[in-house]
Image (tube, rainbow, N blue to C red):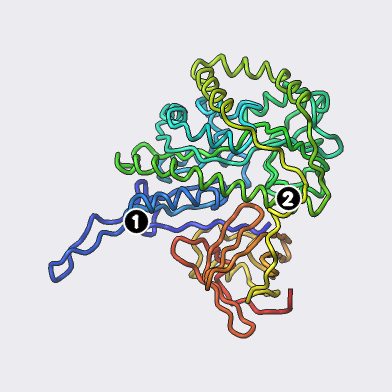
Amino acid sequence: MLRRKTVALCCAVLMLAGCGSAGTVDKAGGAVKAEPVVLTMANTRGAWEVEAFMAEVTRLSGGSVRIEATHEWHTDSPSAEADLVREVRAGKFGLGVVGARVWHGLGVPSFDALLAPLEIGDLAQEQAVLGDTALTSAMLQGPAAMGLEGVGILPGPVRQPAGTQRRLLGPADYKGAEIAFSASEVAARSLTALGAKPVSFVFEGAPVDRFDGAELQISAVWGNQYDTVLRSLTADVGLWPRPLTVVANGDALTPDQRDLLRRAAAAALPKTVESVRSFEQEAIGVLCRRNAIKLVTAGPDRVRELRAAFAPVYAWLEKDRQTRDLLARVRAVRDRTPVESAPTCSASTLAKATPPATRSPIDGVFKINTTLEELSTSPLLGDAGEINDGNWGELTLTFSGGQIELAQRNERETSGLSGTSTLEGDILTMRLFNGELFTVRWSLYKDTLTFKRVPDGIGPTWLVMKPWRRTGDA
């Protein structure tokens, strides 16, 4: 798998609260504008999921504070989220972004109410719940038990059941089934309550054909190309959402910065929901066009049966007084929020998810050849995490009517990804199906395509280190 972990370093070191000066005086005695404070943040997910939050920090501070981040931090490690919490606590990063699911295992149950099965079943409900600031503020008090500041909760896609050989509709379909799931105490207990055998799994493109099913969002089926194995996805069963939590080292922020970050997280909510929804709709369109996986429905009766089967999980959650109170508040918000329709492979769905194909100036097939040594010694290298076997060799980049395909191969690894692209003048935005978002400046002279990084954009080293040569038409 092509891996593109990028970090921008502040003053050549990672610092707790950031760097920048309060202002200096030039030789003539005039005031020089203060450099912005830069906060360092590690994020276990793709850049696009925190893009709105980072932009709101810059906007609300008038540019005096900004965030520079390492995205997809140790994503392929099963302990990445727990490890990052410990790194933030130790002060290696000022800020960290991890899934809410990790906290129970660290002794912090304050986010469990968000993850209770069948309580938040779609993005509209998730947005409504996370928009209740009193509710989220109470949840964000939890990390204080570990000496951390809870900054905000960002929305994520809703996870759904998908089956390989069996359709996961009612409780009977889960009996004895091995279900791959992202590690979570709440999810593990919920799947067990259905009679399933939950198996903790780091997806990230790893094969899932040995399982009877999996819990994951539609965009993950698309991004990991799991529709080659998974045969059905139960579209009207939203098991639980996958929200992200932003936390800070207790010593990393001033009171003003803490207030700024919390306001930025709240302001980013609608834009992040819109981004998640767009990504999910795009995924549905692709999956429906491929017609390999079927979107199926459980129906109201089976959903009621599932809820009844989850009774032991609700009882376990409600043993904790705070979780019981928070769960009641989640349900109250949910009950006054209209339920969204389950996705289907209808003509309207395909129309929404299929933008008209337009040929761009850079449409074509482009290639570069790089060595591991060239990657490792490149002056453009921003993060040692980029030095891996998925980022060198023969790289092929194909642009065609707003679609992109990436292919990589060397004697150690072969991988590929696809996605979409948009051009606005000389700015190219690449949105990959694994959730990553790149923004670079492009220029084309004859058959040579060159990319350069732009401020506040992400341009991985493998993309910008060499000119790409056109080898054919798309």
Q: Position of residue 160 (x, y in %)?
A: 71, 36
- Tell me the element at label 2: helix
Q: Position of residue 49 (x, y in %)?
A: 55, 48
Closer-to-camera residue (19/282) = 282
1 or 2: mark nearer the eye = 2
Q: Which mark is residue 348?
A: 2
Closer-to-camera residue (102/443) = 443
- Place residue 9 in its image quadrant: bottom left
Q: Earlier in the sequence, mark 1 or mark 2?
A: 1
Q: Is residue 312 above or below residue 451?
A: above
Q: Residues within 10 Å of mark 1 (few under 14, many from 20)?
A: some
Amino acid type, residue under disc 1 in the picture: Gly
Residue at 38% from the left image edge and 53% from the top image edge: 59
Query: Left or right: 171 with respect to 381?
Result: right
Q: Is residue 373 above or below residue 235?
A: below
Q: Quadrant of the N terminus?
A: bottom right
